[in-house]
């Protein structure tokens, strides 16, 4: 099924760069695509950042963006809570421990916001969250804004089914939510195999 939207905002809960990664055997290794951050967790948590994810209202506003420049200007006003790690890759400034499927603790940002900067690709923006309780909180924010479940399908060409929500208070925009281990194809934090559950939020401006 083809998606019925013109612009996409995807809030992906994942980090733009993972500071420390635990191997299955318990040893730490450095991923070649991810820069090791030498500050410890206590130093990071003591930083000026005050939150770990964008709000429902912010995602709805970001759905009006259709260019990297627009997103950059919007996210610039959200620092120091979020950093622009690389082109089209934003991540929460603070880092926390996330437990993967093998029980290993990985220190990373609890959310990312990625957009597709490939000129050959369709516009895509995704907010990915790396902890279920944080994802549940964000979904509840949308429900408080009147978003109700409409249907579910494979809208974006990813393997996981997405759940579509809409609100009469925000006509012309739809929210798509899914849980997955493949939130984004080979980019930033997700350049190697993802072993922790991700909760992806996308807000689209519907086609007229």
Image (cartoon, rainbow, N blue to C red):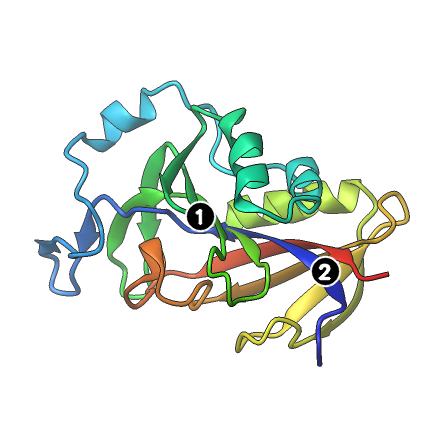
Using the rendered view, name the quadrant where residue 2 is placed: bottom right
- In front: 79, or 53? 79
Q: CA distance from mark 1 to mark 2?
A: 19 Å
Q: Position of residue 105 (x, y in %)?
A: 26, 51
Quarter holding the N terminus? bottom right
Task: Answer whether labels 1 and 2 touch (C-beta < 8 Å).
Answer: no
Q: Residue at x 50, y 28 (%)?
A: 76
- Apparent side of residue 84 relative to residue 193 in the rendered image (left or right): right
As helix, strand or loop, the secondary structure at mark 2 comes to: strand
Residue position marked by numbered label 2 in the rendering = 6
In this view, the residue farthest toward the front is 119
Q: Position of residue 193 (x, y in %)?
A: 30, 68
Using the rendered view, name the quadrant where residue 160 is placed: bottom right
Residue position marked by numbered label 1 in the rendering = 88
In this view, the residue farthest toward the right is 168
- In front: 88, or 110? 88
Q: Is residue 154 above or below residue 164?
A: below
Quarter holding the C terminus? bottom right
Q: Residues within 10 Å of mark 1 (few under 14, many from 20)?
A: many
Q: Position of residue 128 (x, y in %)?
A: 50, 52
């Amino acid at each position: 099924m083809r998606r019925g939207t013109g612009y996409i905002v995807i809030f992906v809960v994942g980090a733009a760069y993972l500071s420390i990664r635990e191997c299955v055997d318990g040893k730490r290794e450095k991923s070649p695509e991810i820069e090791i951050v030498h500050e410890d967790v206590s130093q990071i948590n003591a930083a000026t950042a005050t939150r770990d994810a964008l709000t429902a209202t912010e995602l709805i506003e970001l759905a009006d963006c259709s260019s990297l420049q627009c997103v950059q200007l919007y996210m610039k006003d959200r620092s120091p809570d979020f950093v622009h790690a690389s082109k089209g890759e934003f991540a929460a400034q603070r880092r926390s421990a996330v437990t993967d499927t093998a029980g290993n603790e990985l220190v990373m940002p609890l959310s990312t916001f990625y957009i597709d900067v490939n000129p050959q690709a369709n516009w895509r923006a995704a907010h990915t969250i790396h902890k279920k309780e944080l994802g549940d909180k964000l979904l509840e924010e949308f429900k408080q804004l009147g978003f109700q479940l409409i249907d579910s399908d494979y809208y974006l060409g990813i393997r996981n089914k997405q759940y579509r929500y809409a609100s009469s208070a925000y006509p012309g925009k739809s929210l798509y939510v899914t849980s997955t281990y493949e939130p984004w194809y080979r980019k930033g934090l997700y350049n190697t195999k993802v072993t922790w559950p991700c909760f992806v939020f996308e807000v689209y401006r519907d086609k007229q």
